[in-house]
Image (tube, grey):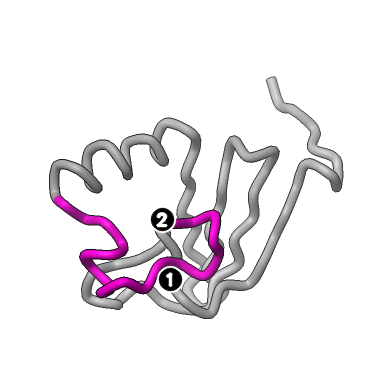
Amino acid sequence: MFKRFSDQDMFDVWLKEHDSYYYSQEGTRPLPVLRVRFNEQTWLYLNPQHGQMTRYDRMSRVDRWLYKGLHDLDLPFLVYGGRCGTLPSSC
């Protein structure tokens, strides 16, 4: 079943820098991308250059911090030398 989102449930922003979820350690992910958040549950990163879409739901964001962050030590302050994502909430 599909859920209809209202304008209050959706937030979008163009990212000109990588954030804590859309990134690569080599810096190879293309920018700018459109990040669309649906009711804080599902986030989409849309790349207009290549027509690619990357989806993060709540569990994949938890996996990013528990597995990649702690297991691989892939934390923004270690990877980027103290520079976090574009938004304070992404740190």
Q: Residue at x 43, y 71 (%)?
A: 18
Q: Which residue is mark 1?
A: 18
Residue that extends furthest to the left in the rendered view of this protein: 72
Quadrant of the rendered structure where residue 35 is?
bottom right
In the picture, the quarter occupied by the N terminus is top right
Task: Say left or right for 6 vs 47.
Answer: right
Secondary structure predominantly adopted by residues drawn in magenta: loop
Q: Residue at x 29, y 77 (%)?
A: 27
Give x and y (percent) for residue 9.
78, 41
**Residues packed near mark 2 inside 10 Å, few (<14), some (14 to 19) or many (20 plus):** some
Residue 84 vs residue 14, the one in the foreground: 84
Of all residues, the one furthest to the right in this rendering is 7
Q: Quadrant of the C terminus?
A: bottom left
- Provide the residue span drawn in magenta: 73-91
Position of residue 57 measured from the top left corner of the image (x, y, whole percent): 49, 37
Query: Which of the pair 56/70 is nearer the observer?
Result: 70
Local secondary structure at mark 2: loop
Q: Is residue 13 left or right of residue 73?
A: right
Residue depicted at 32% across the width and 36% down the height: 63
Q: Which residue is mark 2?
A: 21
**Does the magenta segment cover residue 30?**
no
